[in-house]
Image: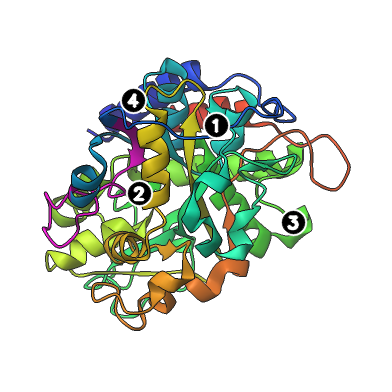
Amino acid sequence: MIGRKLGEVALFILALALAACGPAPQAATPAPVGGAIQSLGVAEGGVSIVAWAGYVERGETDKRYDWVTQFEHDSGCKVTVKTAATSDEMVALMNEGGFDLVTASGDASLRLVAANRVQEVNTALIPSWKLVDPRLQDAPWFTVGGRHYGVPYQWGSNVLMYNTTTFPTPPDSWNVVFEELNLPDGKSNKGRVQAYDGPIYIADAALYLKAHTPDLGIKDPYALTRDQFNAALDLLRAQRKLVGRYWHDAIIQTNDFKNEGVVASSSWPFQVNLLKGGGAPVESVIPKEGATGWADTTMLAVNAPHPNCAYMWLEHSLNPKLQGDLAAWFGSVPVVPAACKGNDLLGVAGCKTNGMENFDKISFWRTPTSDCGDGTKGCVPYYEWVTSYIAVIGGR
């Protein structure tokens, strides 16, 4: 059974790699001056969004969480959503075309800019831009040459989710998913842990090695020399013997924690909230080694079929009520700090609970290139991350 699951995941990643990969460009190609839309027209009646699970809600799961229905009523733009499980899947979908917007993480955003799949955004047409956290307004994962290729949406940390029955005391290290050991219940972790199936997960291994093998000299988990990269792959090959499933579907992961005996895994706060809301004995922690994370940007397709409705959604996406409700639902942090106050769903301490004070501690996802970030070349580019991770999952 485990072998079949691993084979399915390898085929899934291979399909995404063929559609979305190729060598990562070294620099993004900016849109021509004046390329951003200068004025808005009449709403076209619809807007199509590629989004992470839980990012665009209309109250179907919980009627309290609905930031679509009122927008549709006010704008006349019907919202359709295509859920994507990984950044590579998002890139593949945007390559296919036909979508207006995508909630891209930092390991996809500059790839989309470089491939001319998204267009510059005219922030003057988004009145609520002024509400965005200044730390994010010019963030390098969506700003190129001073031009903005999107609007910040939410940010947060990847977390270690664990079963509280198995772990009466919270685990303080990622070693529970990277190294074979007996857990507090006296049983081995083999077959009871999971790992994310996106190639960007190599950075999680690098972050763990940064803390536990300092002689490797890892400074940035997204800028790895060949020796550092190989060490991370070795760690992941050892982890493969422990992993029951490589997850990419958030809902399947919650089912695995409820029904398949999984007790620890990298995860998103979204799954933690879903499971806790259903009474499952789970909690999450950021271990002592730190964590990777995501700062997501809503980006506008270069040939968006509904640009006017898309701009209306971009403005709506920064509404403090939406930002606070989404943060409460997903377990993320609003990009509009004002959303942290006065939101009944988020609560008084919601932003602090979700990690607002951890901004400088998170290694945010970004696409690796051969540029090591210190003026030197020789780091392993993203296309090798993709092919190497496929090999790891395939047992090679």
**Which is more N-terminal, label 1 or label 2?**
1
* Residue 97 showing in the rendered view: yes
Find residue 64 and report its horizontal and vertical position in percent.
Answer: 15, 63
Displayed quadrant of residue 210? bottom right
Q: Do callouts 3 and 4 mark residues in contact (Cβ within 8 Å)?
A: no
Which dot, 2 or 3, sits closer to the camera? Answer: 3
- Majority secondary structure of magenta residues: loop
Could you say which disc has been placed on residue 219 in the image? 3
Which dot, 4 or 1, sits closer to the camera? Answer: 1
The CA span between labels 1 and 3 is 40 Å
In the rendered image, the vertical position of residue 190 relative to residue 202, given as above or below: below
In the rendered image, the vertical position of residue 351 relative to residue 217, given as above or below: below
Q: How is the image coloured?
A: rainbow
Q: From the image, tell me which residue sits under label 4.
A: 7
The CA span between labels 2 and 1 is 44 Å
**Which is more N-terminal, label 3 or label 2?**
2
The range drawn in magenta is 47-69
Which dot, 3 or 4, sits closer to the camera? Answer: 3
Query: Closer to the camera, 52 or 300?
Result: 300
